Image (tube, rainbow, N blue to C red):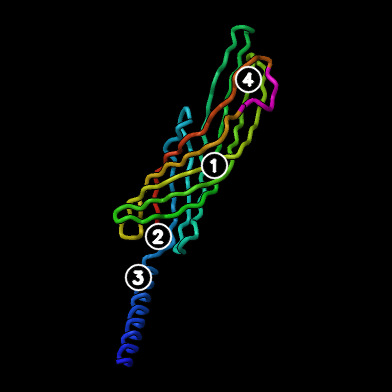
Amino acid sequence: MLNRTKYFRKLCLSGSFLVGLISLSSTANAQFIGINADVAIDYSAAPGSVSGYSVGISHPAPFIPNIGYSSVSFKDIESITVPSDNSSVSLDTTTTIKTINLFYNVPFPVVTITVGFGLGGVETKTTIVENVSDKSTSDSKDSVTEGFFHIGLPFWNTVEFHLGYHLMSFTSIDITKSVTLAGNYTTDKNYSGGMTTIGVQVAF
């Protein structure tokens, strides 16, 4: 009876080991290296059109985050007049936000969810024309944090189409802080917002 019990235990252990190997093999075959490429279609804080993109590389190693990069740029043109002292200023500002991010892919039965976070910087470059003739420029830089998610629909385990939303957060920026203006203008800008993207992932 003792020999049969030992034999049964060995058989169970061997079977468990075999099932584990099969599972690992199946998992390994399902893993892939993926390249993500997205284009920005909107940024909530931009007054007009935007140009931007997001790229990323996914790998099969568990628990290790994937890495990506995001960038969005837009222009803001504004004129301010102060009647009390007859002063006026025109501001032409280009804002660029860039981040490096880490993310995880979370598989679901039908769709794929990607969640991540990033850190980077925001830079504004402003051309200032005050009282029609006085022209100057101002540059400003600050840090930015990013949180994002993608919802993807995979096809054939090699191609995935997805929609993304990247939330960029940073403090308000005084776009004229590096110059001294004659008039008393309010030039603080809050360009924190969300970048909407569409894109594709190709697996290898």
Q: Mark 3 or mark 2: name the one nearer the start of the chain.
A: 3
N-terminal of the pair, mark 2 or mark 4, is 4
Q: Amino acid at mark 1?
A: Thr
Q: Which mark is residue 26?
A: 3
Task: Kindly identify the amino acid type of the residue bearing the numbered disc 3.
Answer: Ser
- Inter-mark Cα distance, 3 to 1: 38 Å
* Residues at discs 3 and 2 in contact (Cβ within 8 Å): no
Q: Residue at x 61, y 6 (%)?
A: 84
Spot occupied by residue 7 in the image (x, y as percentages of width and height): 32, 89
Q: Secondary structure at mark 1?
A: strand
Q: Is residue 138 above or below residue 147?
A: above
Residue segment shown in magenta: 174-181
Q: Is residue 176 magenta?
A: yes
Q: Which residue is mark 4?
A: 129
Residue 137 in the image: state x and y as whole percent: 66, 27
Viewer-closest of 202 and 121 = 121
Mark 4 residue element: strand
Q: Which comes sooner in the sequence, label 3 or label 1?
A: 3
Q: Which mark is residue 191?
A: none
Q: Is residue 140 above or below residue 84?
A: below
Whether label 3 touches label 1, CB < 8 Å = no
Q: Earlier in the sequence, mark 4 or mark 1?
A: 4
